Amino acid sequence: MADINLRAVEKHFDGVPALHAISATFQDGEFVALLGPSGCGKSTLLRLIAGFEMPSAGAIAIGATEMSNGQTGHNVPPEERNIGFVFQSYALWPHMTVRRNVSYPLEVRRTNKATLREQTDAALSATSLIPYADRMPSELSGGQRQRVALARCLVSNPNAVLLDEPLANLDVALRASMQDVFSDFHRRTGATMVYVTHDQSEAMAMADRIAVMSEGRIVQFDTPQALYAQPRSRFVAGFVGEGTVLPISEVARDDACVTAKLFGAKIAIQTDSPNPDLICLRPENIEISETGDIRAIVQRSTYLGGRYRLTLEASSGAQLIAESRAHFPVGTQLGVSVHAPWAFAET
Amino acid sequence: MTPLKGFGSSRSEGRLLSIVLLIAITLTLTPVVRLFVEGVTDGDQLSLNLMQEVLRDDTTRTALLHSLITAGLGTLVSVVIGGAFAFLVALTDLRAKAALVFCLMIPMMIPPQITALSWTQIMGPSSVLLKTLGMAPPLGAPQPLYSPQGIILLLGIQHTSIIFLTLRAGLRAIPQDVVEAARISGAKGLRVWWQIIVPLCLPSLAAGIAITFVTALGNFGIPAMLGIPAGYVTLPTLIYQKLAGLGTNVLAEVAVLAILIGAVAICGILIQRFFQSRQRVHLVGSTSRPLAIPLGPARLATECSLWLVVAAILVLPMLGLLATSLVPAYGVPLRLDTMTLSSWHEALFRQPATRRAFVNSFNLSFGAALALIAICLPLAWLMERNPTRLGRLFDGLVDLPYALPGVVLAIAMILLLINLPFTEATLYGTIWIIFLAYLARFMTVMFRPIQASIRQLDPAMNEAAQSVGASLFQRLRSIILPLSAPAAVAGAILVFLTAFNELTVSALLWSSGTETLGVMIFNLDDSGETVMASALAMTIVLVVMVLMGAIQLAARHLPKGVVPWQT
């Protein structure tokens, strides 16, 4: 097991930049998710760590070994990095049985027969694949194929496991159970895992820390809790969790708390920035009350089971998302009060 | 692909489909059936006597053996060259791949008799090129290509591109991540190639080998030009010699020979179909990113050697041909003061026979291309909309007249048309028998590109026209024709290209006045007019290359699967 160090990693494709000077450290044994919309460069970053691509600049180290360096051109090929990679399409070899697929990394390493058999069996049983060991990949379901891919990268005791949207091809129910498989796998092996996804709930559910990426940059790298409660940019506030970003003015501080004006009403805010100019309003920051300072009209009401999701239009024209246990028909006039939202300065 | 069965299709479509399908099946399949009937009957009786008699004959057995040896070893040569090219082009980061592929395709498009002629011009004692360079062997030294080895070598080069194309298509279907998964598992270099890539592309390689063998088996131009002077007879040349020497009296006998070679060919075709159906079945994953394994420092050396091979199998023979075409008489070395265009002038403008051949070949190819568009366009569209059992049968068998050796089709055509039913008339000896044979043989060359493009059409296009009241022929003219026109034009150029050079079929069907260009080159060389044959051959090579270039330039605007060398 090892940590992963990225130092000012850049990648250009034919002169077009795909990654801009990415620096980050993934701790030993950490489960890191790379989260972002498609085209943000997250898969490129993963392929750089795996060694399928060379960085145009910067350096990547796994553990104490420098794996690639854009300046010197030094590059350890993927086959010598001792990492596991789980592909979105599983990439099982269709001409080999499940057992041979799993044992292949050991076969390549010239492991002796007895150890090979033992470790393969261990990997197969850890993924509950023993009954399918002699089948061909084409005879397996999607979830089973994904488990074979997982067993294959677990069998050789890799320094790190990289996963490229491994659940994207599975249906919703299977996705949830495979999330448990990955979490269990991580807990048991303590492997450093880097998991690429565009699905925030997937990242939230499994990762220790999430690197939110946008247009080739890591815009925020934090725990799921911090990302949700303390976003530091408009993009993260909008991409992670449900929320509305609104401008504030007249920030004032006294001993106890920070206040600011929203739509002319004075509200308390939380912040660690000296000059915040935006707030992120989560549904739980918004309370519907007759005495609320902000007036709003219900534009849409969606039943979510046990509660309603309300889209409100404030008198200033801004849209707010609130949740309520009570039903309000469209067009109802409401009073809304805002409770200590997170405020940040857009850089 | 399952089109809307019966929905939205009108009765007039069904009627038109039956008519066009009937024409197409009559054209392509009746000759083959007729040939088979001839083999198993004697007079009006069902009999296998003649078949036994011919098969017991020693010349038959020798010719069969020679055919199998040359086709088999020739295929081996193709596999070595074509396989190496396919692996390197499909899997690595070579530069200028498109140019390399294009150059490798030219030998396939140059007719075999020209290949043979051009190679004999760079070897042997009378080679103008060698004489000019002062490297010619002494007079009386044997021409090394007039031998089984020469036939094998040239058959191998001629069909290299078939192996190349099928194998490359198979390699492209291998998802990149399957290879990456092997590398990340720790497998390096040749191990990835041997344990992952080769097993996955074996079905396409096997299919390619089978079809190359069938094509080599049916090749007439090369064994005729090289084998006949050496007294080395294969089945196609045996049939030609018998028919040319003894006329139609031996028709029943050569029919048996044609059945024999057809039977071997059909085995090969079945093997090819078997492997083709196994291809790509279990492959899942993204194929969007092409594989490009970095060759590193070996790249330049690899590129150099590949281009050297191209130079050896394409440029060198063409230079030899060019050199021969520029001398005043065969055997004169080429110098600045001996260089002349007189043979070009003679071949292109003076000789009535060659001019006639140009006109014949042009009319035949152009006519065949037009007629085939008229048949294939409605046929492909209607078959896509109305899947019927007859349609599926046709779809499965339309390749047969093209895949079967040309001599088989030619004999079948003679049998079918020598006495038109219910009349005294015969088409044998007229240009129409060649025309009908071309329609049968090249139907698939036109049909497949059109079919590929129509399958990519949105069925809603036609339904929208139908909903505003356009009749069947209006829709065909204003919707289907324009939308599939690029594919139809590409198909037409391919038909023209193949027919313009065709030798095997017309060699057995021509008579005085209906010579084709292929026959003309063969006859000129046979009668010692090598210089004029070279000039004529050079003209054809230029035409071929211009037409191929035209297709290549248009390739970007064509639907996928239309240009054969851009699969």
Image (spheres, rainbow, N blue to C red):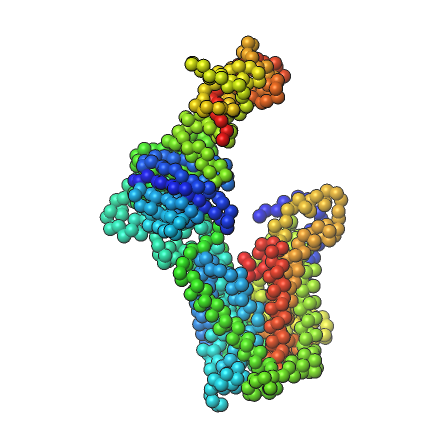
Q: State whether residue A229 appears in this view.
A: no
Work out whether residue B126 or residue A47 is closer to the camera in this orientation and state it.
A47
Query: In the displayed structure, would residue A191 be above or below residue B504?
Result: above
Q: State whether residue A278 appears in this view.
A: yes
Across and down, in percent, residue A119 comes to: 27, 44
Across and down, in percent, residue B163 comes to: 48, 64
Work out whether residue B302 or residue A310 is closer to the camera in this orientation and state it.
B302
Image point (55%, 12%), residue name: A292
Query: In the displayed structure, would residue B171 be above or below residue A49?
Result: below
* Residue sitting farthest toward the top: A291
Q: Quadrant of residue B224?
A: bottom right
Work out whether residue A226 or residue B345 is closer to the camera in this orientation and state it.
A226
Left or right, residue B166 beside residue B496: left
Disc tally is: 0
Image point (49%, 85%), residue name: B134
Image point (67%, 81%), residue name: B345
Image quadrant for the N terminus of chain A?
Answer: top left
Query: In the displayed structure, would residue B466 be above or below residue B135?
Result: above
Left or right, residue B416 beside residue B103: right
Across and down, in percent, residue B286 comes to: 48, 47
Image point (43%, 36%), residue name: A34
Across and down, in percent, residue B131 comes to: 51, 85
Work out whether residue B513 or residue A168 is closer to the camera in this orientation and state it.
A168
Query: In the displayed structure, would residue B146 be above or below residue B485?
Result: below
